[in-house]
Image (cartoon, rainbow, N blue to C red):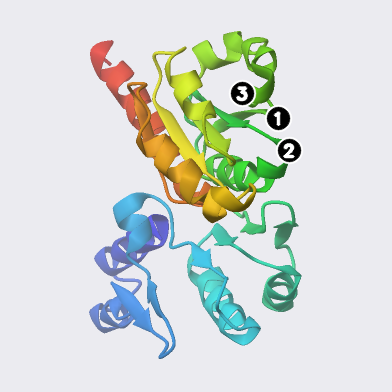
Amino acid sequence: MRDQLKHMLESVQQGTMSIDEGIEALKELPFLDMGFAKIDMHRELRQNYAEVVFCQGKTPEQIKKIIEYLAQKTNNILATRADAEAYNAIKEVVADAQYHALARIVVINRRPIKKNKGTILVISAGTADIPVAEEAALTAEIMGNTVDRVFDVGVAGIHRLLANLDKLKTANVIIAVAGMEGALPSVIGGLVSRPVIAVPTSVGYGANLHGLAALLGMLNSCAAGVGVVNIDNGFGAGRLAGLINEDSEKVKLHSDGV
């Protein structure tokens, strides 16, 4: 969107596009009202990434119309909580869409994104937590970050986590995904001097209360530097980690006098 807007303004300046044509092109900013959805076409200018489509709760036809429009206006598109039916609807309008079934994410990549230098480490406590962890990892990757993964290293076998201590200490940001009692982020927070984003999952037996026990455990962490996102919110964790990673690189450049 930024490149398209720049091109349009340059065209008006150079006289290859009339002022009226420019005004017509700007009508859809800051959003397009489709009746059932208001697409935020201004978000990429504000946040460096276009609006992400949350598919859960939307009909296949609604998803298809939103994606079809975004595909005409933006280079890269991310759709989360997408099941096979949502993916099939997207494929009808964007043939090169890629589906990551485990993470329930659909990706349309048409423009390379400049990579941030630091690494984001995504850790899951158990194998059952991997879908949420993958949602976080893919979100961070798609938005321009290098991501490393360490799965199934929960506190029931803490030696598995300690065997990856080097990765923990060298990552810029750590995303810790855990269900059950949600203890993993606290342990990691006590081992490293890095921001830890805790993601509670709904994995667990009855008293886990669909992730509430893990959420409360993470919110009550005694480890400094641990922040918490909502239950099963891998997307939110991946996006936040990317912003932290990007800002850490800016701080480093500034401190180096660049």
The three-letter amino acid code for the residue at tag 3 is Val
How packed mark 2 is, by other alpha carbons closer than 10 Å (few <14, some 14-19, many 20 or more), is few
| Residue farthest along the front direction in this orientation | 207
Q: Residue at x 56, y 48 (%)?
A: 208
Q: Which residue is mark 2?
A: 127
Compute the Cα span from label 1 to label 3. Answer: 9 Å
Q: Position of residue 224 (x, y in %)?
A: 32, 21
Kind of element beneath mark 3? helix
Tell me: residue 106, above or below residue 33.
above
Q: Which residue is mark 1?
A: 152
The mark nearer the N terminus, 1 or 2, is: 2
Q: Tell me whether the residue at label 1 lies in contact with that at label 2, contact meaning CB atoms closer than 8 angstroms.
A: yes
Quadrant containing the N terminus in the rendered view:
bottom left
Tell me: residue 5, above or below residue 153.
below
How packed mark 1 is, by other alpha carbons closer than 10 Å (few <14, some 14-19, many 20 or more), is some
177 and 66: which one is in front?
A: 177
Kind of element beneath mark 2? helix
Compute the Cα span from label 1 to label 2. Answer: 5 Å
Q: Nearer the viewer, mark 1 or mark 3?
A: 3
The mark nearer the N terminus, 2 or 3, is: 2
